[in-house]
Amino acid sequence: MTDDPFTQAANWDFPVPIKYGPGRLAEVGALCAAAGCRKPLIVTDRATAKLPFVEILRGHLALAGLAHGTFSDVSPNPTDVEVAAGKAAFLAHGHDGIIALGGGSGMDAGKAISLVLNSSRDLWDFDYNLTPPTDIGKADFVPLLCVPTTSGTGAETESTAMITDTKRGIKGCVWHPAQKPFAAVLDPDLTIGLPRNLTAWTGCDALTHAIEAYCVPSFHPMCDGIALQALGMIHHALPLALENPASIQARGVMLTGSCLAGVAFLKGLGMVHAISHMIGAEFDTQHGLTNAVLLPAVLRFNAPVIGPKVAPMCQAMGLAATDFEAFYAAVCRLLDHCDIPRSLAEIGVTADRIESVAAKAMTDTAAGTNPRPFSLGEVTVVIRESLTHAR
């Protein structure tokens, strides 16, 4: 036996009940039954649906005496059309709960489907930028369980979901404050087989969440503390997970750090996400990878205003120096270690769409919480710079 906490089970009740530990996927059936869910629908993306642990999950549900189904017609950047199809599948087969399984795409799709099941409301009535519908309460939502299979999105503790609006060609955030997962299961075993590139890309997504959340200028000491803890864990463990992908300890630290970073960004995000969401909508790029390419250019833009934030981030990362240059260099070294491309052009972004992406980025929720306010012209410059020389 080992006394390493990341190889053992633990339960946390903040901000929702969290079941952490290797092998805890086996508890999903009992958790669903305890929540009154007798026929859950597993919602995941097309790629995840083919992985062995999905069949293992089905076996656990069957052993718990639960009927179940699977909806996996979900893209890497889920769309409102796919959410509507998931709702139709849920209703057609008499399901009574959602298991949102996967990285960001599977969990976002599952959460978005859970918002619209017992309502005639359109998905975009739940737009984060609007006042939440007041005629809908907790009793109107089906039980929702989140199971992350990557260490990046951190989306397992809230109902927020990023969905592509196919009519407007943008990514938008949907949610309702009364819809919370009744539990999240963090099982690092599920991340053991994650390929190196996805380990790197999703890990950089979590890194970006921690940095952007901490740099949001509003006063939120709880989220700030959580963001710094996440940053330190991710900076330490991501190289270890890349070098030793079978390490439960490294995978466990990453999965926990990702979850913490996801809690922290309830405070808000910034320009990286404002741009990345719209690049994802226009070019269908992988979200964490897009964030990673953009991060250095946005840090350079924000450098004049994040001075007081830099030293605590350096300390969390264990750096000897505590100035912006040391922080920036450490981030770039980690991105190099993760083999992150040095330009948006390398991931398929083209110059003819820069103005369109920039205009849409100005409408993103994350634009309003960037530490340095920016104009359309300024965000266009950052995107243009990142197109050829992001770092």
Image (cartoon, rainbow, N blue to C red):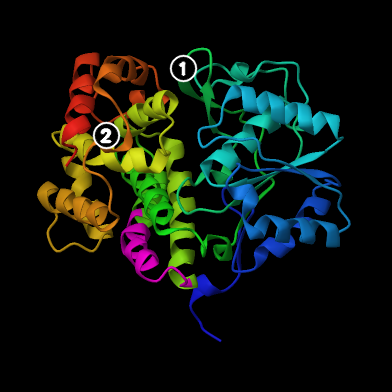
Label drawn at residue 249: none
Expressed as whole percent of the image width and height from the top left, the position of residue 261 reads 43, 48
Front-most of residues 129 and 331: 331
| Quadrant where the N terminus is found in the figure | bottom right
Which residues make up the magenta segment?
A: 231-247
Q: Answer yes or no: is residue 170 visible.
A: yes
Expressed as whole percent of the image width and height from the top left, the position of residue 295 reads 26, 40
Residue 74 lies, with reference to residue 239, above or below; the image says above
In three-dimensional space, the C-alpha distance between marks 1 and 2, rounded to whole angstroms, equals 19 Å
Question: In the visual, does 31 lie left or right of 384?
Answer: right
Question: In the visual, does 8 lie left or right of 211?
Answer: right
Give neighbour class at mark 2: few <14, some 14-19, many 20+ (Cα, 10 Å).
many
- Give the SS element for disc 1: loop
How many numbered marks have been drawn onto this rendered protein structure? 2
Residue 141 lies, with reference to residue 380, above or below; the image says below
The disc labelled 2 sits on which kind of residue? Leu
Label drawn at residue 169: 1
Q: Answer yes or no: is residue 311 visible.
A: no
Which quadrant would residue 39 be assigned to in this image? top right
- Give the SS element for disc 2: helix
Residue under label 2 = 344
Give neighbour class at mark 1: few <14, some 14-19, many 20+ (Cα, 10 Å).
some
The disc labelled 1 sits on which kind of residue? Gly
Expressed as whole percent of the image width and height from the top left, the position of residue 194 reads 49, 58
Q: Indicate yes or no whether the magenta region holds residue 235.
A: yes
Front-most of residues 79 and 308: 79
Front-most of residues 320 and 196: 196
Q: Earlier in the sequence, mark 1 or mark 2?
A: 1
Seen at 36% across and 43% down, the residue is 289
